[in-house]
Image: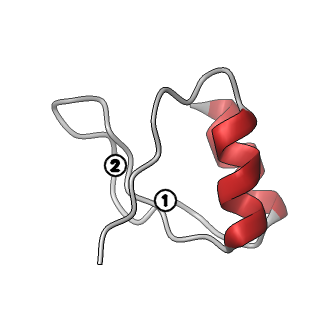
Amino acid sequence: MPVIDAILRQQGRHRTHDVNALGAITVETAAEGIRRLVEAPEVKAVFQLD
């Protein structure tokens, strides 16, 4: 997931958990980071957890 990690680093963020059994990654980022993740072809979906 180098592209995702690069986007997060540019935002001063990082993964909060490793990849799970479903291939999902948990991250915390700002709105700009979310926009960039949504646009990345490697990202299949983005979900918000409260």
Location of residue 45 by image quarter: top left
Binning the other alpha carbons within 10 Å of mark 2 as few (below 14), some (14 to 19) or many (20 upward) gives few
Looking at the rendered structure, which numbered label has been put on residue 15? 1
User: Residue at 72% across / 60% down in the picture?
Assistant: 33
Q: Quadrant of the C terminus?
A: bottom left
- Residue 4 lies, in percent from the top left, at 64, 41
Which residue matches tag 2? 18
User: Residue at 39% across / 52% down in the picture?
Assistant: 47
- Residue 46 lies, in percent from the top left, at 47, 46
Quick one: which residue is furthest to the left in this view?
21
Q: How is the image coloured?
A: secondary structure
Using the image, determine if residue 21 lies above or below residue 18. above
Looking at the rendered structure, which numbered label has been put on residue 1? none
Q: Nearer the viewer, residue 28 or 15?
A: 28
Binning the other alpha carbons within 10 Å of mark 1 as few (below 14), some (14 to 19) or many (20 upward) gives some
Q: Nearer the viewer, residue 13 or 47?
A: 47
Q: Are marks 2 and 1 in contact (CB under 8 Å)?
A: yes
